[in-house]
Amino acid sequence: MLHRTGKDHLKEWAFAVLILILSRDLELRFVSHTESTPAFRPSTDTVGLPVEASKALIEADPDLPLDCRAALERGHVQTRSIGDPAGEGYLRRISVRKADDGRLEELVVSYEAGPLAPRTELSKVRRRLANAIEAIPDPVAYFDAEDRLVLCNTLYSNLHIGSGSEVVVVPGMRFEDVLRQDLANGALEMSEEAQTAWLSERLRKRRDPVFETEIRMRDRRWFRVVDRATEDGDRVNVLIDITSLKTAQRRLEEVELGSRVGLWSLDLVTGESSTNVYWAEMLGYDPDTMGTIGFEDWRALVHPDDVQKAVSGFNDCIAGTADRFEIEYRMRHRNGQWIWVLGRGGVADRDPEGRVRQIAGVLLDISARKALEAELGLRAAAVEASADAIMITDGSGCIIDANPALLSLFRAKNQTDLLGHPWHRLYDRSAAADLAAEAFPSLRSEQHWRGEVIATRLDGSLFEQALSMTEMPDGKIVHVSRDISAIKALARDQRALQEKVELAQRQEAINLLVAGLTHDFSNLLALILHLSDPASADAAVLATIDVRAEIHRAARQMVNLLEPLQGYVAGTSTLEEVDFVDIVRNATKLTALGAPRLLSVESDLPDQPMMTLVDPLRLTQVLLNLGLNARDAIGHEKGTIRFALSQGSEAPEGVTLDVGQVPDAPFAHLIISDTGPGIEADIREKIWMPYFTTKGGQGTGLGLALIAEIVRDVGGGIALQTMPRRGATFHILWPLTKSPAQAIAYAAGVQ
């Protein structure tokens, strides 16, 4: 349950032009209805969808998604001007609404048109003043000149809750009563014997203009109490949680033990120095036998090239030009190698005249860091030299780094043309909105997105961009991209060329089929001419039969011969869901058209449909090419071509794919076999190669190569089994469209 209802919240924001309420996942939950709603107001059908789905809103305010994420992470109000605030612009606010348990629950986004009326501004100021003390992250209270409580925040009130879970501070309570109540409720960790003296001293110090002390609560938290008087005699009481500081002080020795930091000190008056055991171990020495290390002993261990730099820190402190120093230099390890160290130190003590009396500090082994810096330097050089365009944006979407390849890609003269600008400057509004809608949800859920987009160079020219975006743990986003316009153009050209090749192959198949039909058509036409010839010598015979019926029967035979060709000749290339069984049945008929008299074309097809998403022309082309190749191989000899179709779940035993892969089950398993002479071994190795043909000048050598490409494109596979004089058998494994029931059954291992 929220602190305020949605209705109360809307009353509070009644002056806003537009109000949106988003979930933590940036899904749109509410859109306000006002007469002055701007043009980019999301439509009601986008409620329940990611905010990026409201394209007009993102076009008007492309920084909204990233600013919402920043508000969630930081937990406070985010404001930004959209357009011209003095004219047609808007002031956009993002505030965080919390649940009773303190968790961030919702985001409230408001758009206020133009400069607000003075009374509205006054209302906002009053509201901010009323909430200011509550927004302070530390317990704070305000007492009047009579030391009575005027106002305190929730943190201050909760700090004084006793064992009975009752709020024990109320307006009007005297400061002394607050302290006595704390002691009575056991809120302070203090023995009863010490309470009276502590209370007396605390009230005495209360009269000082400024007073600071430390207290420990019963829950073991430490607070620094800051008590200050105002000009009119009132007092402000602030408690700062220093638990972590006290813990750090208490564990200083543990830190030294765990971190193995080398500590040192040098007394400039006596010349005495000291180091801890880790200082010695860092350089490979035994602390028990090392003895005292003086300034000159230390200097002798420093690399000759680094002595001047290392000593300068001491000299600056002694001369009074610096209070501390931090210097990286090399020191000689006992085994003779040089290690990198970081020396941090400063003035630890001065005499009454201000002269430096003691210098102290720490020594850290940074050899590993130096090696990492060298590696990172190489990586940075690689990024600079990379042919890929690399850009980094911060959490608000501003470009903070760009390599030379990116500057070249977008035709920027220098980095200032891009740095500090929002990422969407590199895209037009529509493309930026589409990119945000697609990429940002993936970045939130998976921290990565990859895709293609139309980008805009600084000179206004457009290009096709392959883009990869990765979100880093600190909220920065790394964009890696390249210009793929030429590649995409080449792909389009290759596709157009492939379509021409496929069209040529279809025409070649049609020519073969038409040539085979010539004999059948000639016989039927001769019969029609004979029956319709008025001067026929067989007039007496013709008088005994129904001539019209016979002519109609012959014409119908001609139509039946052409029917299988209609879809193949007149069809257009489209991707659709079709029945694989129908395609194979039609391909069987096409293969049989005009076939030699001794050739038999058979089929073994299932009764149930087998649906697949495919271009029917391309699938028919695969089957027809294989069928006509088998027909050519058999020639005018007696033989059989057989099309057999079934549903498969794994590659047939003993079959090795020549092309492609085994599709996900269930898939269509088509077998096209013939009783021809088979394929010799030396020829079999070349049949899938483009331009290889055994037909001499009558073949293009592209048929089987085209079949292989089509099968690969759909994610299927093809295999050939053949032996000389025993025919050839082609296995085609083709993906099917799985129904939800099939998908569940196969996922469970049921076939």
Image (cartoon, grey):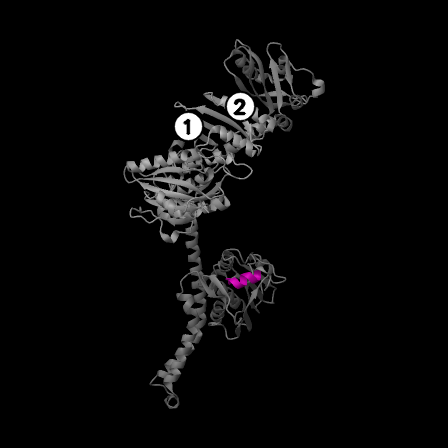
Q: Main secondary structure of the magenta part?
A: helix
Answer yes or no: is residue 431 visible: no
Rendered location of residue 69, percent (x, y): 44, 41
Work out whether mark 2 precedes mark 1 in sequence or the reverse, and give the earlier one.
1
For residue 172, above or below residue 206: below
417, 147: nearer the viewer: 147
The residues colored magenta run 737-746
Asked if residue 743 lies in the magenta stretch, the reply is: yes
Asked if residue 720 lies in the magenta stretch, the reply is: no
Helix or strand or loop: what does disc 1 sit on? Answer: loop
For residue 376, above or below residue 33: above
82, 585: nearer the viewer: 82
The disc placed on residue 8 is none
* Residue at the (42%, 72%) spot, across then down: 563
Looking at the rendered image, the disc whose residue lies closer to the viewer, 2 or 1, is: 2
Q: Which corner quadrant of the image does residue 187 belong to?
A: top right
322, 624: nearer the viewer: 322
Rendered location of residue 331, percent (x, y): 62, 20
Amino acid, disc 1? Asp
Q: How far apart are marks 2 and 1 (CA)?
A: 20 Å
Rendered location of residue 135, percent (x, y): 43, 35
Relative placement, left or right, of 336 versus 148 is: right
For residue 89, above or below residue 289: below
Rendered location of residue 530, percent (x, y): 38, 82
Q: Name the residue under label 1.
A: 144
Query: How many numbered dots are placed on residues in this image?
Result: 2
The disc placed on residue 200 is 2
